[in-house]
Image (cartoon, rainbow, N blue to C red):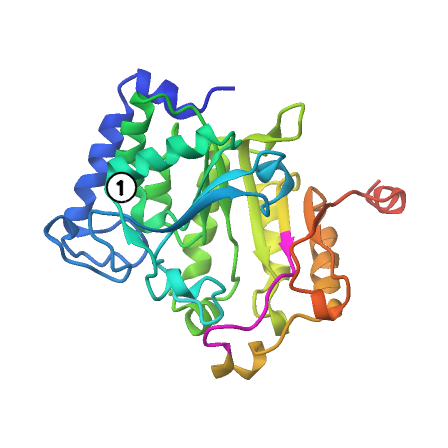
């Protein structure tokens, strides 16, 4: 299956979309913060990024969800900086402190092509929101040099729906977080005002574009949405409301990655309620809430005991015979 951006490029639409996104940097409004700085003249807003993307690392990643990593790995590019400021960020060295190297759009295109040569199943852009126009410009270059991998838009979910609309016909796989159901929690722990509102509208737009996740005969995702939900201690993430939203407003067939891997780091010490790992009981409650909303497609994470509860072993979710009978 050819990625959508190749058809969009053939119709000469990709360049127009890319140019429109680039122009937005003159008074930057590409994320909910709407900083309004002129990034084209070197001004920097919340994300501390101008017209060159900063890349921390790239690799064939084998630790994502099974249909993303597959057998050959996901061609993952980790961008520095972020439009959120999570107190517990596991990647704070580059997402908050800016570790990494500025690259040109040509260099970013070369990285995409290098990951393709490694045999990766897809290109996985981690924290792409603030560099989206730079990615599109790089994509134009890479297409001319033979790029043909589908794109995974791996985002915190703090997005503007109108900006996501620009990506219609370019992105095949959306991998958004749905992190908070309560704006007060989003502000307190991630400095993200009105996160639930922006998050829900943008995820609805993602679903409108690409729909329920579809997989090839080898189990590799070709198109669709997978929603990640990181379960936080003390029900801070608002799992019940988020699962209810997904079931009612998106689809009960939505694929969900229910993540147990939270562990305290960075500034977690400032907040006693999150300065601990998740308990098995808290994670089991989140799993029950998900199933209670009729959501069974996706993956859960094994615990292997509390000392290894931040592990990344992901297993498929299947309905049991008893659960199926209850639904009938």
- Is 259 part of what is drawn in magenta? yes
How many labels were placed on the picture? Answer: 1
- Which residue occupies 22% across, 59% down? 35
Residue 84 spot, x, y in % from top left: 38, 62
Quick one: label 1, few (<14), some, or many (20+) residues within 10 Å?
Answer: many
Q: Quadrant of the C terminus?
A: top right
Query: Quarter of the image holding residue 145?
Result: top left
- Which residue occupies 16% across, 57% down? 37
Q: Is residue 38 left or right of residue 237?
A: left
- Which residue occupies 32% across, 28% down? 142
- Which residue occupies 69% across, 41% down? 297
Relative to 3, is 104 above or below? Answer: below
Relative to 300, is 11 above or below? Answer: above
Q: Main secondary structure of the magenta part?
A: loop
Q: Is residue 138 left or right of residue 180?
A: left
Q: Secondary structure at mark 1?
A: helix
Residue 258 spot, x, y in % from top left: 64, 54
Relative to 32, is 232 above or below? Answer: below
Q: Is residue 223 left or right of residue 33?
A: right
- Is 286 part of what is drawn in magenta? no
Q: What is the magenta range?
A: 258-268
Query: Of residues 200 and 101, which is closer to you in this image?
Result: 101
Q: Circle 1 sits on which residue?
A: 134
Q: Name the outermost residue toward the top.
A: 10
């Amino acid at each position: 299956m050819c990625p959508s951006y190749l058809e969009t490029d053939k119709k000469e639409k990709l360049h127009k979309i890319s140019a429109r996104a680039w122009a937005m940097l003159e008074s930057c409004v590409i994320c909910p913060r709407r900083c309004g700085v002129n990034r084209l003249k070197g001004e920097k807003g919340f994300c501390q990024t101008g017209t060159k993307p900063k890349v921390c690392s790239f690799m064939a990643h084998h630790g994502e969800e099974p249909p993303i990593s597959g057998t050959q790995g996901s061609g993952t590019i980790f961008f520095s900086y972020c439009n959120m400021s999570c107190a517990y960020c596991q990647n704070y060295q580059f997402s908050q402190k800016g570790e990494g190297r500025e690259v040109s759009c040509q260099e970013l295109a070369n990285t995409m092509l290098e990951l393709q040569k490694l045999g990766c199943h897809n290109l996985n852009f981690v924290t792409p929101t603030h560099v989206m126009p730079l990615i599109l410009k790089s994509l134009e270059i890479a297409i001319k040099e033979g790029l043909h991998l589908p794109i995974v838009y791996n985002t915190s979910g703090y997005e503007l729906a109108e900006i996501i609309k620009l990506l219609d016909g370019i992105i095949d796989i959306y991998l958004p977080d749905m992190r908070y159901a309560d704006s007060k929690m989003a502000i307190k722990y991630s400095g993200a005002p009105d996160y639930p509102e922006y998050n829900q509208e943008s995820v609805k737009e993602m679903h409108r574009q690409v729909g329920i996740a579809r997989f090839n005969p080898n189990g590799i995702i070709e198109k669709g949405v997978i929603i990640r939900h990181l379960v936080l201690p003390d029900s801070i993430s608002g799992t019940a409301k988020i699962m209810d939203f997904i079931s009612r407003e998106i689809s009960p067939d939505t694929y969900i990655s229910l993540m147990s891997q939270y562990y305290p780091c960075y500034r977690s010490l400032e907040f006693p309620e999150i300065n601990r790992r998740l308990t098995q009981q808290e994670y089991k409650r989140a799993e029950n809430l998900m199933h209670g909303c009729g959501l069974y497609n996706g993956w859960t994470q094994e615990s292997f005991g509390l000392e290894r509860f931040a592990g990344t072993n992901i297993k498929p979710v299947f309905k049991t015979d008893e659960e199926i009978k209850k639904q009938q």
